[in-house]
Image: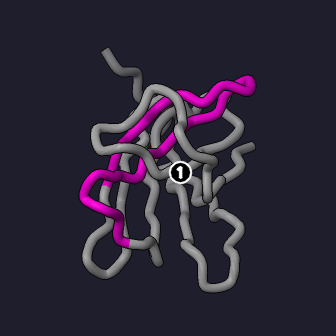
Amino acid sequence: GYAIRGSGDETETIAAPASPGGPTATLRRSGDSGTLELARLEQLRSSEVYQAWVRRAGRLEPSSVFLPRDDGTAGAAIPRGLDGADAVMVTIEPRGGSEHPSSAPFLAIRLG
């Protein structure tokens, strides 16, 4: 089962440092989970997806796979793994996602 701590509305919003004209991202975090909201993403080839990763103790753990909407925005759930993590990152991966990043993260949100 899932333990829910607190009243459920204790969310923390963390933004990624933005590069001019590049993608923007914010993480709305509530305990061990959160929601990644992105904008200004490029549309990908049909063989590619974006994938979120949670970094803990130097290891990247795979999280959600997602595609941008037509306007370049996207939302991705981070269902677990944020407790004790130091960053959430995003890469471009082959469709279906990867167990390990196949490209360098282009975006990182530092936690803590």
Q: Crowding at label 1, few (<14), some or many (≥20) Cα neighbours within 10 Å?
A: many
Question: Where is residue 83 drawn, in percent x and y?
Answer: 60, 29
Q: For residue 73: magenta?
A: no
Residue 35 locus on image (x, y percent): 42, 52
Q: Which residues are magenta?
A: 43-66
User: Where is residue 60, by image quadrant?
Assistant: top right
Residue situated in front as seen by the camera: 21 or 83: 21
Q: Which quadrant of the figure contains the C terminus?
A: top right
Residue 66 on image: x %, y %: 32, 52
**Residue extending furthest bottom?**
21
Circle 1 — which element? strand
The relative height of residue 81 versus residue 96 in the rendered view (above or below) is above
Horizontally, residue 17 falls left or right of residue 37, namely right
Q: Is residue 28 above or below residue 84?
A: below
Residue ID at (46%, 55%)? 36
The residue at which mark 1 appears reads as: 90
Tag 1: residue type? Val
Q: Main secondary structure of the magenta part?
A: strand
Q: Is residue 69 above or below residue 51?
A: below
Report the colour scheme. one colour
In magenta stretch: residue 46: yes
Q: Residue at the spot x=30%, y=59% of the render? A: 67
The one nearer the camera, 105 or 12, is 105
> Residue 58's quadrant in the figure?
top right
